[in-house]
Each structure stands twice: as structure tokens, then as C-alpha cells.
Image (cartoon, grey):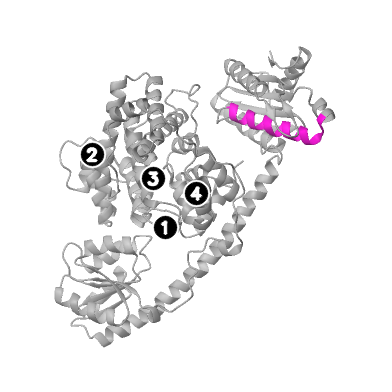
């Protein structure tokens, strides 16, 4: 079972590396929650982040947004797209801008965003077929639905790097298992927690939670928020496959293509229409990749890919790997991106971004500063400097006041709104010496100033002062890192202890306490929504004979193998727990009598057909199943369990290896 979301959020927020929106985007999120906010209010905030404004305008003018006439200002974009859409796009584009790189060595940040953009455009295109989801909402959810990957890579870089090495791009379900094994949390859970913290709709969270689900036979098709969540989850699942086809280049692409075509057929969409849809996805992927500076690749048309896949006759090796212990190699491998020996910024020089449109000043500053041991990056105006600062994160920015496109004060104000450059030491070069002008500059966020023409002795003294501040900031950052690592380790330990308290250690299924807690929650939800609910009690037939004949080690093997089959045979939304001894409890939300017959017999046949071949036990076993479907006579989960237990007894009396439904 999951820990409280606020506990998880607090732990990952404390790390300081959590992918998060910029200050402007956070303000937009807050404004959008107020129904009295106008487009003018939103526009005034957005212009404070020129980079974000530019991305919104480019999106509004792209073909994917459905724009017909060119949009040249943010007010028109807000009217055309709607404030809700702009709010969500600000969130997605802002997180993208802040998270193009990071500390996890085996996490490919560029590939992550390439895949996320493919997910976004695929989700948007698919939403036009599944009408219950708004296309722009599907775009945002597709772009951010795997943000948990990025968060885990950012918060636990060393641990997560080992997880990725072990997984080696195998099955998606294995990655979730490895994450749970190593971190006692998985990326889907983290994505949901972040979505909730950002105030995204509840059905987004439900969709992310269900995106691994491939059993769509019993999905609701209504327009309630929960139904929209199920449908959006379906879209994300298909979009993931579409994105994988975009990125995969080897023989592993062939089964993906055939699976994608099968999905289109199951949805009742003609092959030509399905092929045209995917080619539209490829075109928009490339177009938006150019807009957002995300690398995309040239992918053949789906018709070509289908032809190649159907002609392929070779073997495709599986990437499935066994879940084994992932070594920690001691404390020295803890997540610590700031382990370099402490040196003062002055003794090793600083990373300085110099911003001036004067070629003469630039040459002189470059000569003087590099001679003093500093490392320089150059920008010719404020807009160029803003982009460079967000990409390179310099320790000091030395900028002119008066510049084209974006002056020094506007540059400072914009950087102070971001997460990455909020603490960058800002020195402004100015001919203004009036008190009012300098007060204005310090109000905008500068840390110091030098008067032009520049006295380089004075500038060097100012940089020494800056170096002391930078050194203190780095020391504080290292301290925060150490505190963060300690909190992370305690958080992982806490989750592991929580898991042990609610997990049966032999079968790795939820234990009786956990199962009953979940049943209470599903009972309450069913009471609110009026949805159907059923439970099953399963008992292994003649289990005592297994223990008596083969020993308790064999009995443990039978329980473990049977539990694994149960888990794989059930829907993702169902919960299987060990109820005691050889008994198991299954809780199936949204299931009625017809589902009970189907699921019960599928489960019974799966276990009967599971032949075990281990040193302890060889052969197969059978189970008897008692089912109770919620009705007006039931006043609590306890009533349903009692009725299911009576049905189980009837199944045993009738000869075992069968399903008996109460009533």
C-alpha cells in the first residue's frame, strides 16, 4: 500500500533536485485556481518569463493547436488556447526548461524529453478518437505522465542509476519492480504525487496510475471524471507504445508496430485511418521538437514500418531480467552530487557569464577575467543571456544595464523568478550613479554594481566579494545535500518498514491487515459512486497433504508460485492478498456477477494449468473459490467476506476446483 502522499512529497521536495516549475509558472498555476483571474492578469505575469512566453506563442501558432491565423501576443494566445490550457502548457514547458540535464549518470535526459514529447503528441492525436478527453489536456498529461522517472533520477541519482543499469530497457513492469525493490516507491506513484501537488485534475492522477494497464475490456465509457481518467489512462498506454516506435530503431520495433496495428483493429479503426493517424503523430513530433528544442529523429511512415514488421522472420531477444538484489556497495555510493573537495570559488576561479553588446568591452573583460583564472561564457544581449544562464547555470553574471531586446534589470528580474538561477550572483555594469537608479537596480535583484568605464582593480575586488558569497552558497548547498541524503535514506527505510508491515514476506502479496484496509476504502468508494464491488475467498485444495507429503518447504513453494499466478491473472485494479494460511482474498472494484464468473474461472484455470517443477515440489494444484457480489443486504466488508467464505465452503463440498458465487 502507498504511504501518505504528503510524506513522499516532503521527502522528494527536501532534496532540492525535484523537477519543478519556474516561479512564473508557479504563479500562473495559482492564478488559474482563482475564477476571477482575467486573461490580462495571466498575460502580465507571463511576460515576466520571455522564454516561456515564446514557447507558448510558438505552440499557439503550430499546426497541432489548430491555429488558423498568426498569433503575435500572449493575450491572443490565452484567448485562442484558453487559460486552462495555457496553465498546463506553462507547467509542462517550465519543467522541461528546468530539467534538460541532471546528476543521474545512467538516465538519458535528452531521450526522456524526446520520448515525453512523442507521448504528448500521440496522446493528443489519440484523444481526437476517444472523445471523452480534451486534446490539449491529453497533450499535457502525455508530456508529464512519466515525470516520476525524472524525479527519481534527480532525487536518488546513484541508486536510480543502478536500477536503470539492472533494468537495461527491459519490460516496463520490471522497472516498477526494481524501483520498489531499491527505493520502496515507483515512478508512477511519484508522478501522481507531483500531479496532485501541482493541482492537476484528479482524473489525470487516475490516468497515470492506470497507464500500465492493458486490460481495457471492462473500462467504463461515461463522461464522469473517473471515467475520463480511465479513458485517459488508455490513451497514455497506447501513446507509450507509439512513442516507443518513434525511438526504437532495431528489430525490437517490429513487434511494437504489429501490436500498435492490433490495437487500432481492436478499436474498430480502419487500417488506412490508423496509419494516417500515426503519420500525423510523426509530423507533429518533428514540428514541436523544433519549437521546443527537443531532438527528434526521422522515422519511416507507418506503412513502411508495418511492411518491414510483417516481412521480418528473425528472432528478437527478450530484455526480461530477473529481479535480484541491487548492490549498494556501502555508504560511499549514497546519492551525493556535491562530493568534491571544498575549495573557495576564488582559488579555483568562477564560472562567469559576461553580457554586453560592446565588442570592445567584451574583449577587455575576456582578457582580464581569464587571466585571473575565471571561466567565461559570453552573451550579446539580455535575451541571449537569459537562455545561456538557464542552460549553463553560471556562478556569477556580469551584465550591462542598457542592452537591446532585454536590459540588465529585466534580465535580473526574470532570472530571480526561476528555480535554477535564483541565487546566481548578479553584478551590473552601469554609467548610472544616481541613488534612485541604484535603488531601482537593487530592487530588481542585483547583488552588486561597477561603474563604467570599468576600473578593473575595483572589479577584481567586487569579484573577491562575490567569491566569498559563492563559497558560502556552495557550502550551504553541500550541507543541504547531506541533510537531504539523510532524509532520503530515512524515507526509504520508513517505506521499507511500512511495506514489511503490510506485506506477506513469503508471497510478497499484501497481508491480511493491508487487504482489509484496502477493502474498507473500496467499500467507501463504492458507497459514494454506486459502482459494483465483489470479493473472492480462495483456498488451495488439499494443501495439508502437500505439507504432510513433501514438507513445509514444498508448501512454501506452492504458496509462492500460486500467489505469482494469481497476481498475473488479475486485472491491474484488483487487489490480491494473503488472508491466512493457504487462503487468499481478492477485491475487485467495479466488477459484477458476469465479471465474477469470467475472472473466477480464468483464475481457477490459470492455477490449475500452472505446473511447478522445483526441487521441493513437482506438479500442479487446484483452488476453490467463493465469491460475494455487493448487494443491499451487505452492511460492511465483513458481511461480504462472510458470504464469500460460505460460498467457498459450498465449492469445497461440491467437489473442489470450482467457483461458487453466493446467491
Residue 329, percent from left and from top: 60, 60
Q: Residue at x 50, y 53 (%)?
A: 161
Q: Is residue 564 magenta?
A: yes
Q: Give how far apart the Cα atoms at labels 1 and 2 are.
A: 35 Å
Numbered disc in front, either 4 or 3: 4
Q: Residue at x 47, y 43 (%)?
A: 169
Identity of the residue furthest to the right in this view? 548
**Is there CB contact under 8 Å for labels 1 and 2?**
no
Q: Residue at x 82, y 33 (%)?
A: 551
Numbered disc in front, either 2 or 3: 2
Disc 3 target residue? 33
Q: Give how far apart the Cα atoms at labels 4 and 1 are.
A: 15 Å
Image quarter in which the C terminus is found: top right
Disc 4 target residue? 164
Relative to the observer, which residue lies in front, 252 or 183? 252
State left or right for residue 544 relative to residue 641.
right
Q: Is residue 406 magenta?
A: no
Q: Badge 2: how crowded within 10 Å, few (<14), some, or many (20+)?
A: some
Q: Give how far apart the Cα atoms at labels 4 and 3 are.
A: 37 Å
- Decide: is 288 above or below 468: above
Count up the numbered dots.
4
**Is there CB contact under 8 Å for labels 4 and 3?**
no
Q: Give how far apart the Cα atoms at labels 1 and 3 are.
A: 31 Å
Disc 2 target residue? 80
Amino acid at each position: 500500500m502507498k504511504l501518505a502522499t504528503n510524506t513522499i512529497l516532503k521527502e522528494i521536495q527536501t532534496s532540492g533536485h525535484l523537477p519543478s516549475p519556474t516561479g512564473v509558472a508557479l504563479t500562473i498555476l495559482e492564478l488559474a485556481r482563482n475564477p476571477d483571474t482575467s486573461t490580462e492578469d495571466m498575460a502580465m505575469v507571463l511576460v515576466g518569463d520571455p522564454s516561456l512566453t515564446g514557447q507558448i506563442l510558438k505552440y499557439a501558432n503550430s499546426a497541432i493547436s489548430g491555429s488558423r491565423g498568426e498569433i503575435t501576443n500572449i493575450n491572443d494566445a490565452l484567448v485562442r488556447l484558453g487559460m486552462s490550457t495555457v496553465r498546463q502548457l506553462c507547467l509542462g514547458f517550465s519543467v522541461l526548461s528546468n530539467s534538460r540535464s541532471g546528476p543521474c549518470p545512467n538516465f538519458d535526459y535528452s531521450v526522456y524529453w524526446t520520448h515525453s514529447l512523442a507521448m504528448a503528441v500521440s496522446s493528443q492525436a489519440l484523444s481526437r478518437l476517444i472523445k471523452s478527453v480534451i486534446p490539449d489536456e491529453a497533450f499535457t498529461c502525455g508530456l508529464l505522465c512519466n515525470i516520476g522517472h525524472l524525479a527519481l533520477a534527480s532525487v536518488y541519482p546513484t541508486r536510480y542509476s543502478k536500477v536503470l543499469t539492472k533494468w537495461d530497457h527491459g519490460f516496463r513492469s520490471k522497472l516498477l519492480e526494481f524501483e520498489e525493490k531499491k527505493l520502496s516507491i515507483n515512478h508512477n506513484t511519484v508522478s501522481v504525487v507531483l500531479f496532485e501537488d501541482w493541482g492537476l485534475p484528479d482524473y489525470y492522477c487516475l490516468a497515470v496510475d492506470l497507464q500500465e494497464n492493458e486490460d481495457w475490456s471492462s473500462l467504463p465509457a461515461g463522461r464522469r471524471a473517473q471515467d475520463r481518467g480511465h479513458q485517459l489512462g488508455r490513451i497514455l498506454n497506447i501513446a507509450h507504445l507509439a512513442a516507443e516506435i518513434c525511438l526504437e530503431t532495431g528489430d525490437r520495433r517490429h513487434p511494437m508496430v504489429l501490436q500498435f496495428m492490433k490495437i487500432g483493429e481492436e478499436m474498430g479503426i480502419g487500417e488506412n485511418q490508423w496509419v494516417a493517424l500515426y503519420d500525423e503523430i510523426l509530423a507533429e513530433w518533428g514540428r514541436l521538437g523544433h519549437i521546443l528544442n527537443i531532438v527528434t529523429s526521422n522515422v519511416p511512415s507507418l506503412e513502411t514500418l508495418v511492411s518491414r514488421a510483417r516481412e521480418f522472420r528473425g528472432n528478437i531477444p527478450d530484455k526480461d531480467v530477473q529481479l535480484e538484489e541491487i548492490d549498494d556497495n556501502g555508504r560511499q555510493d549514497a546519492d551525493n552530487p556535491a562530493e568534491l573537495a571544498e575549495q573557495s570559488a576564488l582559488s579555483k576561479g568562477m564560472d562567469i557569464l559576461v553580457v554586453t553588446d560592446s565588442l570592445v568591452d567584451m574583449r577587455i573583460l575576456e582578457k582580464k577575467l581569464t587571466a585571473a583564472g575565471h571561466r567565461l561564457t559570453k552573451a550579446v544581449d539580455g535575451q541571449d543571456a537569459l537562455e545561456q544562464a538557464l542552460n549553463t547555470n553560471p556562478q556569477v553574471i556580469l551584465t550591462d544595464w542598457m542592452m537591446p531586446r532585454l536590459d540588465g534589470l529585466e534580465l535580473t528580474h526574470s532570472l530571480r523568478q526561476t528555480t535554477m538561477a535564483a541565487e546566481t550572483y548578479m553584478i551590473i555594469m552601469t554609467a548610472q550613479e544616481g541613488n534612485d537608479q541604484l535603488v531601482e537596480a537593487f530592487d530588481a535583484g542585483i547583488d552588486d554594481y561597477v561603474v563604467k568605464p570599468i576600473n578593473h582593480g575595483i572589479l577584481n575586488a567586487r569579484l573577491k566579494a562575490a567569491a566569498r558569497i559563492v563559497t558560502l552558497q556552495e557550502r550551504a548547498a553541500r550541507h543541504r545535500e547531506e541533510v537531504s541524503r539523510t532524509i532520503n535514506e530515512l524515507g526509504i527505510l520508513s517505506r521499507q518498514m511500512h511495506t514489511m508491515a503490510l506485506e506477506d514476506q513469503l508471497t510478497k502479496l499484501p497481508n491480511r491487515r493491508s487487504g482489509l484496509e484496502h477493502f474498507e476504502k473500496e467499500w467507501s468508494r463504492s458507497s459514494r459512486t454506486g459502482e459494483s464491488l465483489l470479493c473472492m475467498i480462495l483456498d488451495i485444495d488439499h494443501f495439508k497433504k502437500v505439507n504432510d507429503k513433501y514438507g513445509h518447504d514444498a508448501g512454501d513453494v506452492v504458496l509462492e508460485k500460486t500467489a505469482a499466478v494469481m497476481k498475473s491473472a488479475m486485472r491491474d485494479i484488483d487487489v490480491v492478498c494473503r488472508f491466512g494460511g493457504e487462503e487468499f482474498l481478492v477485491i475487485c472494484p467495479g466488477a459484477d456477477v458476469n465479471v465474477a464468473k469470467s475472472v473466477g474461472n480464468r483464475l481457477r484455470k490459470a492455477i490449475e494449468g500452472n505446473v511447478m517443477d522445483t526441487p521441493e515440489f513437482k506438479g500442479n494444484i487446484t483452488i476453490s473459490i467463493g465469491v460475494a457480489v455487493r448487494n443491499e443486504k451487505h452492511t460492511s466488508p465483513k458481511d461480504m467476506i462472510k458470504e464469500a467464505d460460505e460460498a467457498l465452503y459450498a465449492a469445497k463440498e461440491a467437489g473442489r476446483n470450482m467457483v461458487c458465487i453466493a446467491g
